[in-house]
Amino acid sequence: MQDSSGPLAKAVADLRDGFFAYRSWALLGWYEIKQRYRRSFLGPFWLSISTAVMAALTNVAGFGTVGLSNYPGLASMGIVSAIGSITCLITALTTLPALMILTRTRVTVHRA
């Protein structure tokens, strides 16, 4: 029999407690972003853009490896999916700012 206070049980309890403290770490993360980019207009947008680019490149890398398959049907699906991911990224990075300008959407900053 294993001891219920072993290292695995302590690790699981620590992960559980950390997960249920999401309000604390979400608030601290939000305050860090606000503090880091407090005088920058493009800072939060840069954070979003870099996250979207990294997610799309990871997606393209995954589909690209499927495109290297020896099975022609699977390879063509991987290549088409990678091209689709690149197209979606380019569309999102060009269309969203253009729509924000056309609709005159403004970001309001509330100073505390």
Image (cartoon, rainbow, N blue to C red):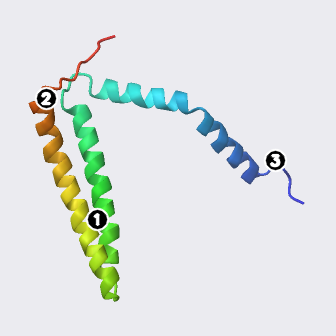
Mark 2, mark 3: which one is toward the viewer?
2
List x then y, in percent, for residue 95.
14, 44
- Mark number, residue 60: 1
Determine the residue positioned at 14% across, 36% down.
Answer: 99
What residue type is disc 1 on?
Val
Amino acid at circle 2: Thr
Q: Residues within 10 Å of mark 3 (few under 14, many from 20)?
A: few
Q: Position of residue 55 (x, y in %)?
A: 32, 54
Q: Residue at x 35, y 68 (%)?
A: 62
**Label 1 CA crowd tier, 10 Å (few <14, some 14–19, many 20+):** many
* Residue kind at label 3, given as amino acid type: Ser
| Residue named by callout 3 | 5
Mark 3 element type: loop
In the image, residue 71 sits, relative to residue 97, either above or below, namely: below
Query: Mark 2 vs mark 3: which is more N-terminal?
Result: 3
Residue drawn 25% across the image and 74% down it: 79
